Image: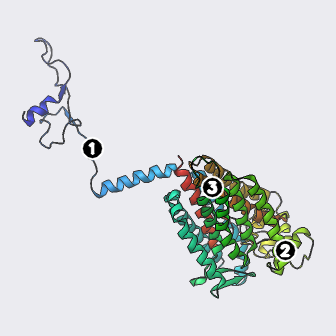
Amino acid sequence: MSPADRTDSRIKTSGPANPAPNQAPVQPAERTIDLRGGPDDPKLKAPNHPNVVVVTRRPAPSGRVAKVADRMRVGATDFRRYDPVLFGCALALSLLGAVLVWSATRGRLLAADDDPNNFLTRHLLNMVIGISLGWVVTRVDYRTLRAYTPMVYGVVITMLLVVLSPVGTTINGAKAWITLPAGFTIQPGEFAKIIVILAMAMVLSERDVGRDRPSDRDVRQALIWAAVPVALIMLQPDLGTVLIIGTIVIGIVAVSNARSRWVVGLIAAAIGAALLAIALGVLDQYQIDRLLTFTDPDRDLQGIGYNTAQARIAIGGGGLLGQGLFNGNQTQGAFVPYQQTDFVFSVAGEELGLIGASILIALVGVILWRGIQIARLARDPFGRLVATGVVTWFAFQAFENIGMNLGIMPVTGVPLPFVSYGGTSMFAAWIGIGLLQSVHIRSR
């Protein structure tokens, strides 16, 4: 059959073919040539007729255009699998933190004839880097991270050893930082929280066939993995980070379905270790004074109790609606030390009031709620324990920071996740979000 014959075989004609002799001539009916179902043959062309409509397939993209289209299609599919509520609340907290840090530092920098946007710029830069790190972790299958956990563990332990060497920098009584060029510092203890989560989840998720809980041997191995970074951090000493890691350990062991005696024993051991550290002089005197001030809030208001007292005054002065951004008496008067880091919540309480502070707490609560849902729906024990560790970390650290601002928890110097100024803290928090997103995506 010739190409012309094949073309004519696809011509669909509607209307009478032979009109009656006395009937008025009928205009030629519209004819459609449908080439969508046949081969792409350039010889198949419609005849030169004014009422012919040719329907063809849209040519499929090829080469570079096809690759770009495939990547966009895959990217759109992956984006729909993310948890937008989790990401949105973390981003909102980070942006709110940028505003609070700006308000807490702007007046002091202006008084010193310095750039009033210095801390704001650095905080936003830390946020962008943190989001990028979180995105990288999200793209990696969390089960792949399991295979690389021993290697990452070794890197973090090496960093903690470097901190204790002459290279380490002492800030506020703790030798916990490594100074980098351009005035930046890094705190390896923040990354220790992540590696403890991954290491314990790796050990406790490996179970023998037919067992629904880790063996006592598995729990002991997991505790050894956690004990090494805890011991190195205690030598700094950084009591706040040790408390957070200890809470993470208890949370993961409890959710792993280990015997209840392990959870009870860990809580008792934590209390005993704290008392022993005080008795042996492991803690510095200022850390002991902080604990004593917690038991007696009116103790030494002009000394060790000054920070907490001024933070409570700032929060109490905010009322329902607050005094307005950049208008807080305590904040702009620089009466609260370390207000951009440890006591950033007092800025929210004073300048945004009860409503603004409640919104901040609600954002933290939504993140914890989404993390709990991700842990509950995880497909394997490793994913469930990783999500549990991140939720426990965020929950206790937020409670400790807000609590010490309100005077209901001892001052330990831990930052408020996503809100406080600090690069390493921001990086670690967004990596935690990346871990939650990675588990969420692979559980759908």
Which tag, 2 or 3, sits closer to the chain's start?
2
Marks 1/2: CA–CA distance: 73 Å
Task: Please tell me which residue lies in front, 79 or 279.
Answer: 279
- Farthest residue toward the left? 2
Q: Can you identify the residue that label 1 sits on?
A: 58
Horizontal side, residue 55 vs residue 47: left or right: right
Query: Mark 2 touching mark 3, by CB under 8 A?
Result: no
Residue 421 appearing in the image: no
Q: Can you identify the residue that label 2 sits on?
A: 290
Which tag, 3 or 1, sits closer to the chain's start?
1
Residue 106, placed above or below residue 60: below
| Residue 80 placement (x, y as % from top left) | 50, 49
Which tag, 1 or 2, sits closer to the chain's start?
1
Horizontal side, residue 300 vs residue 372: left or right: right
* Amino acid, disc 1: Arg
Disc 1 secondary structure class = loop
* Amino acid, disc 2: Arg
Horizontal side, residue 310 vs residue 33: left or right: right
| Residue 9 placement (x, y as % from top left) | 14, 29
Marks 3/1: CA–CA distance: 49 Å
Residue 16 appearing in the image: yes
Mark on residue 385?
A: 3
How packed mark 2 is, by other alpha carbons closer than 10 Å (few <14, some 14-19, many 20 or more), is some
